[in-house]
Image (cartoon, coloured by chain):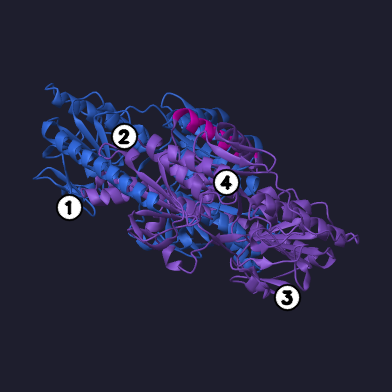
Chain colours: A blue, B purple
């Protein structure tokens, strides 16, 4: 025993020495650092691009995020439908910024901004993060148009935990349908309602239909998973409203070929644990998924700034907050009308371009060469995919649908996935799924949203 | 609107038709099926091997598991230490048994066995599952030697949810250490205690040391992750008690080379949220992981059968329960002394061999050619791995350690992983980790065990 106690004691000394050394390093570093401090709230597409674009600028960049990973949100629906693992589409922020010497990462939840003292406040800590320039890129959550009580019965899809909870719900519905003796309940369990016909809703509906009709079809002995109903409910006149009408029609056709029932002009009036009521008609369903509308992070509240109905801060054409030339709001957190009168859409490429723009503005100011160009969104193309072999792509000058659009969608999404390993892993998962019709991630883990 | 309502109505008719058809099929199938019913509780190594081995037998096989996936438990510690994704080591049971026409899968929690009526009872349902032969292979959970209150502060590793909760805890400890201003607390956050020096404890300690000293080393700006202390606390005289003494010594040496502090003859007397007390000495630590001892699933209670201290049912040499020739208990759920006086160890190969044995016995009885050979465990080799490049392997006639053992360990574990896709995915993850020293699954998801 004596030797282990001795060893433990000497190790404790070593630990004390190391800690003392760290404290000394921290104390020594602070007084000499006079670089302007750029604080970025949110490590989504906008925030991360801004941080990377500042890598050669003489500034101290601090990225604050509630989570420790950047999420490739466009593929989140594939996690929710058991096609990909969370780690395939998420990459630790510290890893992404590891080699960027002027950047540090802070995992914390922002609770407010003290504009007078130029400090960001964080949850559960007295510590405040001082800034010279502040970029808010905290994104958006799904919203229920004043019906927050629907969230429990109709979960939305914005975070990894949302996706694994939805995966849990979908897979458990099939399991329960297999064991229930009540035919009414079985029918309800095998009915999946997706509310909202934007890209997320369309992609989820297509993926669930494929899961039921192809992947699970031989897995059960009592039920026929292929008899599952997948119903996409959209309040507007057509799905994919942001796309040209002919592509909307093609997307609807592709969905219907997969067996998805598409209801348009059918706003949802009520959601409960047993179904939805839309346009006066009740649809009995145990699984309701929400893909209709978003609400921006509360940056407007933090800044006491003007916002639109979706909670997005109304920013100047250069993305600064009115009256606050050193505070920028970008991505889904902001709403801005461009010089041509067009609003900037709430898509990933727009957030990335905004991040780039803001970094350029800040770099110019730090270098003493201010740039005053307003932000202009360049639309390089818009995608939505509908299961295997079908997608729509709108490049403005070119419209694609069907198989060519799907191939291009796959290539583009793998290309833009951050991190070499994730690209490889996703390619492998997709190749396997394509060849075998199987989905490898059909795991019912956690208590999901049942708890 | 009219056309969508009409379409919805006709779809409802279709759904009613399909459901009616399913009801008819179910009703029609039941009366003609006179095959003996084999019910298997648990789809771990033992249960699944038994089910597969019965594939050509004229029996109706029902596999009941609380989860919808088979878990490759030997690699679970890699999920807990951010090396692999859950889906890499788990495979849906329905997928594994999809093409086995005589097998069905039921996702349910068993609550008891009615031996008189020969039925298995399940949670939350009036339904009972009748059997002619019953195989119980429900495995084990970690145990706290009567200190269940330690579970919250010292989680164990048996399920995927355990692994993701432990991953959450380890990664959050580094994040909190980076932001805390208190050097005492920082030291506590950077101390990881693993209780139990069996294979799981040894593998976890090695993996956490590597995570801190190699993977995370450049990720932080304030703390030095390499200064983290990893302490393995074992109550017995050496680590890997089931291995020969020289291999234990080699494992200890490999651990110490990785910077792990190994304390033997040091039983833990107390665990709380701030550390452990063992052999009268307090070690301050925010992360305590439990790898010391298991408790079998409550099969003994279900059967009112004799059990040992770890809750394992004492079975006959042919693995039947005394007085119940049609009920078998196998794997970690059973304890059996072989003809040579040796107990069967609680390892995966033993569970698989037991599953094989029981299937052969049942097949013989169904075919009217009963076999009465007692079960005999064949030890084809035992492995434990300690990070990169080091492992110990004991084949009885051959003992290996270091790099050759590690290579063999990797090959064997990939070979035994169920499912072609999982093998590929794991190989890719490992190759990537090996070349880059990175771990792709460093995601802090869910609320972990903090909630």
**Residue tagged 4:** B245
Is there CB contact under 8 Å for labels 4 and 1?
no
Magenta stretch encompasses residue B351: no
In screen coordinates, is A14 left or right of B369? Answer: left
User: Which disc number belongs to residue B115?
Assistant: 3
Whole-number angstrom distance, CA of label 2 to CA of label 4: 52 Å
Query: Quarter holding the C terminus of chain B?
Result: bottom left
Q: CA distance from mark 2 to mark 1?
A: 26 Å
Q: Pinpoint residue A350: horizontal percent, then vertical percent.
A: 33, 33
Q: Residues within 10 Å of mark 3 (few under 14, many from 20)?
A: some
Front-most of A87 and B355?
B355
Which residue has dot 1 on it? Answer: A126
Chain letter behind tag 1 = A
Whether residue B424 appears in magenta in the rendering, the answer is yes
User: Which disc is residue B407 wearing?
Assistant: none
Whether marks 2 and 1 lie on the same chain:
yes
Judge left or right: residue A68 versus residue B64.
Answer: left
Q: Position of residue A449 (x, y in %)?
A: 46, 59
N-terminal label among 2 and 1: 2
Q: Hey, which quadrant is residue A139 in on the image?
A: top left
Residue range of the region highlighted in magenta in the rendering: B420-436
Residue located beneath label 2 in the image? A48
Q: Main secondary structure of the magenta part?
A: helix
Task: Answer few, some or many: residues within 10 Å of disc 2's Cα (few below 14, many 20 plus, some between 14 and 19).
Answer: many
Disc 3 and disc 1 on one polypeptide chain: no
Q: Are marks 2 and 4 in contact (CB under 8 Å)?
A: no
Distance between the alpha carbons at the discs numbered 4 and 1: 53 Å
**Res A42 visible:** yes
Seen at 27% across and 45% down, the residue is A13
Disc 4 is placed on an element classified as helix
């Amino acid at each position: 025993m004596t030797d282990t106690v001795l060893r433990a004691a000497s190790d404790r000394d070593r630990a004390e020495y190391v800690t003392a050394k760290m404290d000394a390093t921290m104390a020594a570093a602070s007084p000499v650092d006079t670089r302007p401090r750029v604080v970025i709230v949110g490590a989504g597409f906008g925030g991360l691009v801004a941080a990377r674009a500042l890598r050669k600028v003489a500034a101290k960049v601090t990225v604050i995020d509630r989570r420790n990973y950047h999420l490739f949100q466009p593929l989140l629906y594939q996690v929710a439908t058991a096609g990909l693992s969370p780690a395939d589409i998420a990459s630790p922020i510290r890893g992404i910024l590891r080699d960027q010497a002027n950047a540090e990462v802070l995992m914390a939840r922002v609770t407010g901004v003290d504009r007078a003292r130029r400090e960001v406040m964080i949850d559960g800590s007295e510590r405040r993060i001082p800034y010279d320039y502040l970029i808010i890129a905290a994104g958006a959550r799904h919203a229920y148009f004043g019906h927050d009580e629907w969230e429990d019965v109709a979960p939305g899809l914005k975070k990894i935990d949302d996706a694994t909870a939805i995966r849990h719900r979908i897979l458990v519905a099939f399991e329960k349908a297999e064991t229930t003796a009540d035919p009414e309940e079985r029918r309800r369990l095998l009915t999946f309602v997706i509310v909202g016909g934007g890209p997320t809703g369309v992609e989820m509906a297509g993926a669930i239909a494929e899961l039921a009709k192809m992947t699970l079809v031989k897995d059960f002995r009592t039920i026929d998973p292929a008899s599952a109903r997948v119903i996409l409910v959209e309040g507007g006149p057509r799905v994919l409203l942001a796309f040209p009408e002919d592509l909307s029609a093609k997307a609807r056709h592709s969905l219907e070929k997969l067996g998805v029932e598409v209801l348009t002009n059918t706003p949802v009036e009520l959601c409960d644990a047993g179904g939805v009521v839309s346009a006066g008609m009740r649809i009995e369903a145990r699984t309701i998924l929400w893909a209709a509308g978003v609400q921006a992070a509360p940056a407007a509240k933090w800044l006491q700034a003007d916002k639109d109905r979706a909670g997005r801060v109304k920013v100047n054409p250069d993305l600064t907050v009115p009256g606050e030339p050193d505070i920028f709001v970008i991505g889904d957190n902001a709403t801005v009308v461009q010089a041509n009168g067009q609003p900037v859409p709430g898509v990933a490429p727009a957030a990335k371009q905004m991040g780039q723009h803001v970094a350029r503005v800040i770099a110019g100011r730090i270098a003493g060469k201010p740039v005053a160009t307003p932000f202009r969104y360049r639309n390089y193309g818009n995608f939505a995919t509908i299961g295997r072999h079908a997608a729509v792509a709108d490049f403005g000058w070119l419209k694609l649908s069907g198989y060519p659009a799907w191939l291009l969608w796959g290539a583009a999404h793998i290309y833009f996935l951050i991190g070499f390993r994730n690209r490889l892993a996703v390619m492998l998962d997709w190749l396997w799924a394509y060849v075998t019709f199987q989905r490898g991630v059909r795991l019912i883990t956690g208590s999901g949203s049942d708890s």
